[in-house]
Amino acid sequence: MQINNLRLQSKRKRSKRVGRGGKRGTYSGKGQKGQKSRAGRKIHSQLREMFLRIPKRRGSGNKTIPKHIKDISLDTIVKTFNDNAIISPKSLKEKGLIKSVRDNIKILGSKSVLNKKYTIIDINISQGAKNQIEKAGGIIKFTNKNNQQNK
């Protein structure tokens, strides 16, 4: 027996072709006009439409947008910390001024004159607060180059 001698045991059933005339009337079972009666119809879900409308931030260099900047004034730092204290995100969390070490923190200046010396590590600072701390003899350090942005 060879391949050209093989035959099917049962007859091959053809799939029904809809929408090409035939015995289904003028619309061939597709109803009347509209997107669903057209050839190649595709109806997208509403969720997909919403995703397509959202603007995309292209490229690999885009950093995440900081959610919220927690502002801390120099007055609250003077009230909570002693002279020659080291102020870092960890020490602010221990004192209860911020909820998480990962919070985006910024120290703002005050109208009162600063008399205490502080060492500030890895916290964003406003220009006015920076001038006040340096006048009082304080030091500002950044261990990470990414944190050096004065926002």
Image: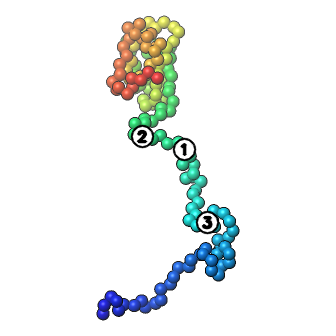
Question: Does residue 143 appear anywhere in the picture?
Answer: yes
> Label 3 belongs to which residue?
38
Q: Nearer the viewer, residue 60 or 112?
A: 60
Q: Amino acid at mark 1?
A: Ile
Name the disc covering residue 54, or none: 1
Label 1 to label 2: alpha-carbon separation: 16 Å
Question: Of circles 3 and 2, which is in front?
Answer: 3
Helix, strand or loop at label 2? It is loop
Residue 66 rendering spot, x and y as whole percentages: 47, 32
Name the disc covering residue 18, or none: none
Name the residue: 42% across, 40% down: 59
Q: Residues within 10 Å of mark 2 (few under 14, many from 20)?
A: few
Name the residue: 43% across, 91% down: 9
**Vertical placement of 113 versus 30: above or below?**
above
Q: Nearer the viewer, residue 61 or 101?
A: 61
> Label 2 belongs to which residue?
59
Label whose residue precedes the other's in the sequence (1 or 2): 1
Name the residue: 59% across, 53% down: 46
Label 3 to label 2: alpha-carbon separation: 38 Å
